[in-house]
Image (cartoon, rainbow, N blue to C red):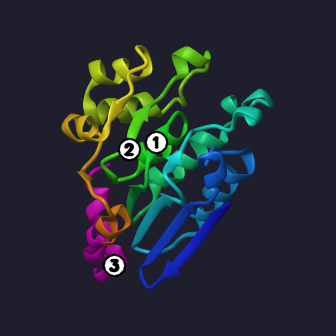
Amino acid sequence: MIEVEKEEGLTRLVLNRPDKANALTRAMLTDLRDAVRAADTPALILSGRGKVFSAGMDLAAAKEGLATSPLWEELSGALAAYPGLTIAALNGTCAGGSMGMALACDLRVAVPRASFFYPVMKLGFLPQPSDPGRMSALVGAARSKEIFMAGAKIDGETALAWGLLNALAEDPLGQAADWASDAIAAAPAHASAIKALFS
């Protein structure tokens, strides 16, 4: 359910469970975390198959305790700590816990039809610990509370205007590849040194 594609200087991690809107299971989170930790390229792109990036947590897995699993933080922490450029190329809607992956990336691009929401208030779960802080760093505390506490569901244009996205594109993978080209061409240590300046 997780595809790992590699070419010179670039790793692509692709969610491949489109029949279930790429809803995340424990096995998928584990595979994603391990793939991020194992990657060693100057750029890493995260995307999905189908019309939805991810509906968030698989509801059957939620009943088995996945909502409180440390895997969510381990995955987002691995993305945040990745020494190269990380890009979320969102092929569609990004919901719930899957937002944590996108928030932990350096850049985010989505198709215009994408929507964004994190229904933890409605579902009775707490968000993953790092997600509110990362969201607030991008869009501010008030808008973050609108998403986490008031259940706001925003469209791509709004996400771009708020600063949640860097760009909208019909071909998010193409845009991500363009962004990644300088990092791929640079010496890995140089890319890592520039990224470290933002820590």
Q: What type of secondary structure mainly makes up the magenta span?
A: helix
Q: Residue furthest right?
A: 64
The front one of 114 and 32 is 114
Give amino acid for label 1: Cys
Mark 3 → mark 2, Cα distance in angstroms: 28 Å
Q: Position of residue 172 (x, y in %)?
A: 34, 61
Percent of width and height locating residue 92: 43, 49
Q: Which residue, as the protein is rendered here, is positioned at the far left?
A: 161
Q: Nearer the viewer, mark 1 or mark 3?
A: 1
Q: Earlier in the sequence, mark 3 or mark 2?
A: 2
| Residue 33 lies in the magenta stretch | no
Q: List the residue tagged with mark 3.
A: 184
Vertical position of residue 132 compared to residue 185: above or below = above
Q: What's the mark number on residue 114?
A: 2
- Mark 1, residue position: 94
* Label 3 vs label 2, nearer the camera: 2
- Name the kind of residue labelled 2 in the image: Ala
Label 1 crowding class (10 Å Cα cut-off): few <14, some 14-19, many 20+? many
Q: Are marks 2 and 1 in contact (CB under 8 Å)?
A: yes
Classify mark 3: residues with Cα within 10 Å, few (<14), some (14-19) or many (20+): many
Q: CA distance from mark 2 to mark 1?
A: 7 Å
Task: Residue at 43% x, 64% y: name it.
Answer: 45
Residue 168 in the figure: left or right of residue 42: left
Q: Nearer the viewer, mark 2 or mark 1?
A: 2
- Left or right, 111 with respect to 50, comes to left
Label 2 packing within 10 angstroms: few (<14), some (14-19), many (20+): many
Q: Is residue 3 left or right of residue 121?
A: right
